[in-house]
Image (spheres, helix red, strand yellow):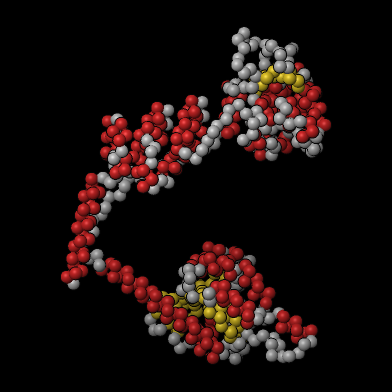
Amino acid sequence: MSIHIVALGNEGDTFHQDNRPSGLIRTYLGRSPLVSGDESSLLLNAASTVPRPVFTEYQASAFGNVKLVVHDCPVWDIFDSDWYTSRNLIGGADIIVIKYNVNDKFSFHEVKDNYIPVIKRASNSVPVIIAAVGTRQNEELPCTCPLCTSDRGSCVTTTEGIQLAKELGATYLELHSLDDFYIGKYFGGVLEYFMIQALNQKTSEKMKKRKMTSSFHGIRPPQLEQPEKMPVLKAEASHYHSDLNNLLLCCQCVDVVFYHPEVMGVVEAHKIVLCSVSHVFMLLFNVKSPADIQDSSIIRTTQDLFAINRGAVLPGASQEAPTNPPLPVIVKDALFCSCLSDILRFIYSGAFQWEELEEDVRRKLKDSGDVSDIIEKVKCILKTPGKINCLRNCKTYQARKPLWFYNTSLKFFLNKPMLADVVFEIQAGIFQAMCLLICAEMYQVSRLQHICELFIITQLQSMPSRELASMNLDIVDLLKKAKFHHSDCLSTWLLHFIATNYLIFSQKPEFQDLSVEERSFVEKHRWPSNMYLKQLAEYRKYIHSRKCRCLVM
């Protein structure tokens, strides 16, 4: 049996009667008739640059055969320099002693504000003793001169000490000196009382464990089978940047086409992606007005580079007009139009890989002046309203994050009618989530399909058994829809869910709609299983036999 005491704080410079320096803990251990032992040589330094030890460990014997371990930490820096050690010390303590000098008010408030909250969190409701050591300067003098008044103002009052004790639920002691009365009888009596309480508690816990261990020496209870763990559906990582690039390469869902009469071919793009990085395109597609932007350079760039021509016949266009044809936009600069595919790839990649853009443009345009002119126009397109264009050196921006992190992003258009071409009506229900999952599978939006799977699983897992039994949702119909729309993860999980809640779903009429293969899987993984029911019957017999034994005894 052992007792662990942690003493925190510095009670100031105190001396023995023979002028040897000492302290509260060392003096108590040296004088108490109940304690015998020597100071350990274990001294740990907070860091190589700190000359004094973080704490001193004392090992002694108390009450004859009880091991007493005391860690005296005079420096509060241990909480800043070695949080792991300090947390373990506080967490493993049976008694905590907080000591301070009544004439050091600055240190008292620093400890109260910075370290007492840490102790409250780390301690496990162990007894705490607060020891206020020393005699307050000019406490008994009625002098009102400025010097004496300032001395009294630098002292920690009794009220402040008691208030601190209330915050910690601690016992407050005032030790005016470290003599035999204050150390041996006053402080020692309180500390030894808590030591006895700690011993009683540990003895009681030990007896309870011994009693519980001895109670199982007779009949052993049977080990019950545990239910099979449900499969875990992990969240899929985002493919945001790769999906944007694929959208450009595959030319899916395009709604704008750039062309120049003298340049072969057209360049297809998406309005919402272009508007998410550039106010020039916002102005071009009427997402914002010139009054909203209030930047003449952006307005001038838009007018100099682009023009919408709704009645244009695009080169290479088919004879059959599509239902919603993309918006034709004339690029007024032929050189800029010839490099537009590279510029769009740069924008769809996040508009930050300037060196790659410059190399791609240089492959098409041999003249260095033309290359510089194209790069400058791209900078003007990406300009932020009201700010000077600071994109001067392409190489300095090569390592920057994509422009989505700095400029207008796609979230600007969320839940807004601007540039929207589809509207989803979504509620917090399982049926609606399954409908959205079907749409996501039809349009091959795999991440949205995965999110719907997670939502359905989370909703079903959160339902209590009573709600599962009374709800009108056809779980077998969900299973069949998940299989039909290639949602393998959800269909496998639903089979496990039916098996885990076998007693509920087996009573429902739709349970008969399961295929032979599905029913075989459910019967194999059902819970409670036949083995579990058999073990449960044995366990009930065991409980009954224990009750009979208690009645006989």
Residue displayed at 31% across by 47% down? 227
Look at the image and tell me whether residue 234 can be seen: yes
Position in image of residue 137 (x %, y %): 69, 86
Q: Residue furthest left?
A: 552
Quarter in which the C terminus is drawn: bottom left
Q: Residue furthest right?
A: 296
Q: On screen, 94 above or below 346?
A: below
Q: How many marks?
A: 0
Position in image of residue 111 (x %, y %): 62, 71
Residue displayed at 30% across by 70% down? 210
Q: Is residue 254 left or right of residue 58?
A: right
Look at the image and tell me whether residue 263 can be seen: no
Q: Is residue 260 left or right of residue 466?
A: right
Quarter in which the N terminus is drawn: bottom left
Q: On screen, 519 above or below 338?
A: below
> Residue 128 or 327: which is nearer the viewer?
327
> Residue 511 or 314: which is nearer the viewer?
511
> Residue 7 or 414: which is nearer the viewer?
414
The image quadrant of residue 162 is: bottom right
Position in image of residue 341 (x %, y %): 67, 22
Q: On screen, 320 above or below 73?
A: above
Residue displayed at 79% across by 24% down? 303
